[in-house]
Image (cartoon, grey):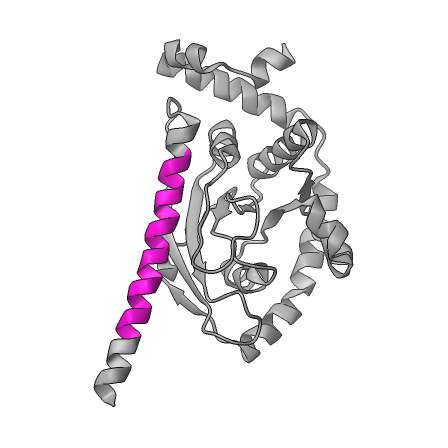
Amino acid sequence: MKNSLLRISKIKKLSMTDKELEQYYNNLRQHYLSLPFDEKAIEKSENNFRIFTIFFNLLAIIKRVKILNEELIPNEKGLIFVSNHIGSYDQFYINRLLLKHGYTPHYLVNDKVTKFFFRWNFVFKHVGVVVVNQDSLKSWQWAEEEIIKYLLYGKSVFIFPEGTRRGENNIGDFKTGVAQIAQKSGAKIVTMAIKNFEKFLTGNPIICLGKVIEFDKQEEGAEATERLKTAVLNAYSEIVKYEEKIKNEHRNRH
């Protein structure tokens, strides 16, 4: 029963009516809600996360971040936030923005990062991240389960759909896992793009909020993922246009 509930073939999905598919997802969500979830431990991890806001606020004094379309951030629970991934410092600037709006994001983190950057291990162990080994199907299935439980319990998560850091001006392919999680959990996805984050204390970091996306029950993973990437690329384009506008204004003044 469990395996048939968790896995649904593409052909079977296409043959199901909207009502049947809705019932399938309702049953699936009830399954996830029946699994163990330590809410007290999660709340403790969120309190620990907020302690680190002292560091995030210090960064804000050192480095001002321009936020575009900030009004697009919804006031809802259980959201998935996504962005392109530039470097190791992306989360610092993103965290402050989300905390400002009442969100304590739980990140999906590659286990290679926790092994390589020993200085982050203490933070990761205490702030409620979900660690995944991207080379292991079993690890990904466990991570997906954990993320969906977070969402169904009204917690918000942050996932970089590229699955790795891509650097400036290089947005790579998006993995389909985010779309799958959104469909299984019913969560909305808040898209954003970031730029000028690669160097810690230089440049002018910019975050641009994009569309809030909901996936149709019948939508295929590849199609949904492409729509997700398009929304991030559009937000990134807005940043480029903003920078051009600032440059032109500067030239006109001089």
Q: Position of residue 90 (x, y in %)?
A: 55, 60
Q: Position of residue 15 (x, y in %)?
A: 38, 9
Q: Residue furthest bottom?
A: 254
How many marks the image carries: the answer is: 0
* 190 with respect to 40 (left or right): left
Q: Position of residue 196 (x, y in %)?
A: 46, 67
Q: Position of residue 233 (x, y in %)?
A: 36, 50
- What residue is shown at x 73% (from left), y 44% (from top)? 40
Q: Nearer the viewer, residue 3 or 37?
A: 3
Quadrant position of the C terminus in the picture:
bottom left
Choose top left, top right, bottom left or bottom right for residue 37.
top right
- What residue is shown at x 56% (from left), y 41% (from top)? 154
222 above or below 1?
Answer: below
Secondary structure predominantly adopted by residues drawn in magenta:
helix
Find the magenta span and give its range: 225-246
Asked if one can make out residue 240 in the rendered structure from this viewpoint, the answer is yes
Q: Nearer the viewer, residue 100 or 118?
A: 118
- What residue is shown at x 50% (from left), y 62% (from top)? 97
111 above or below 239?
Answer: above
Please say whether residue 242 is one of the residues in the magenta stretch: yes
86 above or below 41?
Answer: below
Q: Nearer the viewer, residue 253 or 167?
A: 167
Quadrant position of the N terminus in the picture:
top right
Choose top left, top right, bottom left or bottom right for residue 42.
top right
* 16 with respect to 110 (left or right): left
122 above or below 57?
Answer: above
Asked if one can make out residue 125 in the rendered structure from this viewpoint, the answer is no
